[in-house]
Image (cartoon, rainbow, N blue to C red):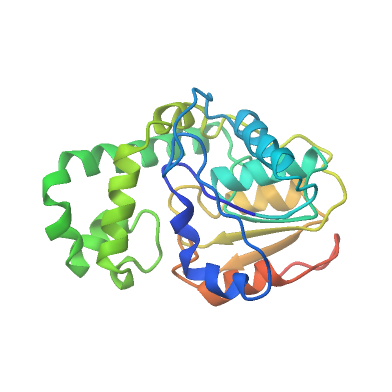
């Protein structure tokens, strides 16, 4: 199961989906208030979103899936692991490791991205059709925004602007801290060195709080590394690493 982050949708995983689906059944839902899932009033915090995902797992009779999570979804995946609902977790730039200043920063960055997108909404098709426009508008999330498909950028921008769950999730962004200890399941934490939303410095706190996890540095990748380095992301999601394995 792949869980996206704030303002995103299941399509963020498209660069890795086909390769994963060749070997496994893959479920990539939209969280409440994002993408194609209606907002049901969930506050947008990690525990409440984990409640919704856990309810889905129960309804589908899925007990211990392998969980991949991005950003807010990474926090949800780690929370589900804490509850004993994961076989393993691969979390890409997960929430839960920011200090007070980092929390304020992340809320400001994602809020500015949505506000800025709304301000130029009529111009988005023309702007995102150019490499310079994609660098300017998508560079906060990706390490190589100029290489992104324009149509995907436009669809992602519209999804961000339209997401009714965004305000609630943004209010909680950075406020959740991963409770410890975490159950002894294999955990991989992967972080892009060019992450501008949850900067790479937070990876050091993750190493401290999760010393038994595998910690992976993603050189040149942004907050959403799946388009920046799909092969590494695919490899991390497919690999089964025992808890306590050495980091890289």
Image quadrant occupied by the C terminus: bottom right
Residue located 40% across and 28% down the image:
167
Residue located 65% across and 36% down the image:
50
Q: Is residue 164 left or right of residue 206?
A: left
Quarter of the view holding residue 215: bottom right
Residue 87 coordinates in the image, percent (x, y): 80, 54
Quarter of the view holding residue 186: bottom right
Residue 173 coordinates in the image, percent (x, y): 51, 33
Residue 80 coordinates in the image, percent (x, y): 73, 41
Quarter of the view holding residue 34: top left
Q: Viewer-proximal residue, 234 or 59?
A: 59
Question: Which residue is at the far front?
Answer: 60
Q: Viewer-proximal residue, 173 or 70?
A: 70
Image quadrant occupied by the N terminus: bottom right
Residue 204 coordinates in the image, percent (x, y): 66, 52
**Can you say whether 106 is above or below 169 in the image?**
below
Inspect this view and state whether residue 6 appears: yes
Residue located 53% across and 69% down the image:
16
Inspect this view and state whether residue 112 appears: no
Give the total of numbered labels: 0
**Can you say whether 53 is above or below 86 in the image?**
above
Q: Viewer-proximal residue, 146 or 203?
A: 146
Q: Is residue 62 left or right of residue 97?
A: right
Q: Is residue 199 left or right of residue 130?
A: right
């Amino acid at each position: 199961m792949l869980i996206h982050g704030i303002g995103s949708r299941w399509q963020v995983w498209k660069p890795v989906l086909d390769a994963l689906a060749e070997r496994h059944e893959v479920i990539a839902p939209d969280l409440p208030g994002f993408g194609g899932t209606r907002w049901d009033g969930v506050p947008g915090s990690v525990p409440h979103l984990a409640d919704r995902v856990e309810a889905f797992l129960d309804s589908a009779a899925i007990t211990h899936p392998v969980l991949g999570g991005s950003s807010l979804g990474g926090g949800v995946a780690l929370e589900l692991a804490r509850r004993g609902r994961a076989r393993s977790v691969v979390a890409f730039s997960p929430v839960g490791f920011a200090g007070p200043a980092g929390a304020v920063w992340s809320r400001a960055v994602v809020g500015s991205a949505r506000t800025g997108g709304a301000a130029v909404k009529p111009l988005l098709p023309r702007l995102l059709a150019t490499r310079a426009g994609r660098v300017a508008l998508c560079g906060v999330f990706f390490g190589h925004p100029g290489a992104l498909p324009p149509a995907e950028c436009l669809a992602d921008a519209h999804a961000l602007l339209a997401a009714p769950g965004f305000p609630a999730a943004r209010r909680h962004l950075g406020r959740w801290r991963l409770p410890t200890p975490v159950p002894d399941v294999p955990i991989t934490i992967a972080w892009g060195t060019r992450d501008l939303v949850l900067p790479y410095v937070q990876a050091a706190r993750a190493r401290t709080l999760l010393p038994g996890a595998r910690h992976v540095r993603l050189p040149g990748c942004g907050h959403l590394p799946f388009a920046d380095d799909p092969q590494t992301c695919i490899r991390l999601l497919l690999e089964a690493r025992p808890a306590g394995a050495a980091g890289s």
